[in-house]
Image: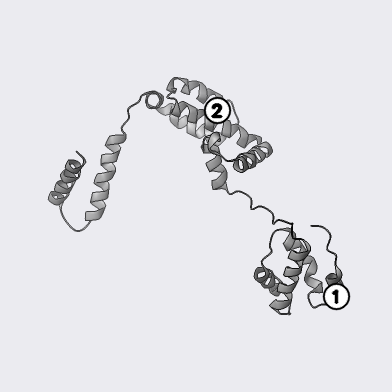
């Protein structure tokens, strides 16, 4: 929207000195009359809100097909797109992610490594982990280097975890259950009652 013409733009108004700012904010996607009035008031506009609302309405009528600029994706959005399977993204999400990665080679390489690691986990290809670590370390990506250094400290266990079909998940589940019972009983009862509640919880699961 670069042309601001029409018979209503040539009238003298208390709003005239502020119209360039209004046009700028409208181009940036701010089309809420109340918000525009508040901003103008802070910039010294002394007129009423009715004039601003009328001007905003005329802008909408003059440019009915102009869409407000899309809100840029948040860090959480981009992280979610990267860590999800590409097939789970809709066309708009996939295109936005493609555009972002095209502008940032480092993030593009990070995405490749993250998805390769996800493939190791999903397909239980733990034997390929040392090769994946070597590929990551060959890239100038310090954040991932910290992650691979942690994996290397207990490599055999990590490889086993990425290869075998069983894990310590059930044990961790019981630990979490006991912690929850402890929190519920904090300051209310002693060990004997906690023991009974833990045993009852296990029996009810059988």
Along the viewing direction, whichever of 10 and 129 lies nearer the viewer: 10
Looking at the rendered structure, the secondary structure element under dot 1 is loop
- Taking the image as shown, residue 87 lies to the left or right of residue 106, namely left
Give x and y (percent) for residue 158. 40, 27
| Residue at x 66%, y 66% (from the top left corner) | 32
- Mark 2 is surrounded, within 10 Å at the Cα level, by few (under 14), some (14 to 19) or many (20 or more) other residues, namely many
Residue at mark 2 to residue at mark 1: CA–CA distance: 64 Å
- Taking the image as shown, residue 20 lies to the left or right of residue 93, namely right
Give x and y (percent) for residue 111. 57, 34
Locate residue 109: give its quadrant: top right
2 and 1 marks in contact (CB < 8 Å): no
Q: How many marks?
A: 2
| Residue at x 64%, y 53% (from the top left corner) | 71
- Mark 1 is surrounded, within 10 Å at the Cα level, by few (under 14), some (14 to 19) or many (20 or more) other residues, namely few
Above or below, 105 relative to 35:
above
Q: Quadrant of the N terminus?
A: bottom right
| Residue at x 44%, y 32% (from the top left corner) | 150
Give x and y (percent) for residue 107. 61, 37
> Does the image show residue 44?
no
Disc on res. 186:
none
> Does the image show residue 135?
yes
Mark 2 or mark 1, earlier in chain? 1
| Residue at x 14%, y 47% (from the top left corner) | 196
Along the viewing direction, whichever of 169 and 149 lies nearer the viewer: 169
Question: Given this view, does label 2 or label 1 mark the residue nearer the observer?
Answer: 1
Give x and y (percent) for residue 154. 39, 27
Residue tagged 1: 11
Q: Quadrant of the C terminus?
A: top left
Disc on res. 136:
2
């Amino acid at each position: 929207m670069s042309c601001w013409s029409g018979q209503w733009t040539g009238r003298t108004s208390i709003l005239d000195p502020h119209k360039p700012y209004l046009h700028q904010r409208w181009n940036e996607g701010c089309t809420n009359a109340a918000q525009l009035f508040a901003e103008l008031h802070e910039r010294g506009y002394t007129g009423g809100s009715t004039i601003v609302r009328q001007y905003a309405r005329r802008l909408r009528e003059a440019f009915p097909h102009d869409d407000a600029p899309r809100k840029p994706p948040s860090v959480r959005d981009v992280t979610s797109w990267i860590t999800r399977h590409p097939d789970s993204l809709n066309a708009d999400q996939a295109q936005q992610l493609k555009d972002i990665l095209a502008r940032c080679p480092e993030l593009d390489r990070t995405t490749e490594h993250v998805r390769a690691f996800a493939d190791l986990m999903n397909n239980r290809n733990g034997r390929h982990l040392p090769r994946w670590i070597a590929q990551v370390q060959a890239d100038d990506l310090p954040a991932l280097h910290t992650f691979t250094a942690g994996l290397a400290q207990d490599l055999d266990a990590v490889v086993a975890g990425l290869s075998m079909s069983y894990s310590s998940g059930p044990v961790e589940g019981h630990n979490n259950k006991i912690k929850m019972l402890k929190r519920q009983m904090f300051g209310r009862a002693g060990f004997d009652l906690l023991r009974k509640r833990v045993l009852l919880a296990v029996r009810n699961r059988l």
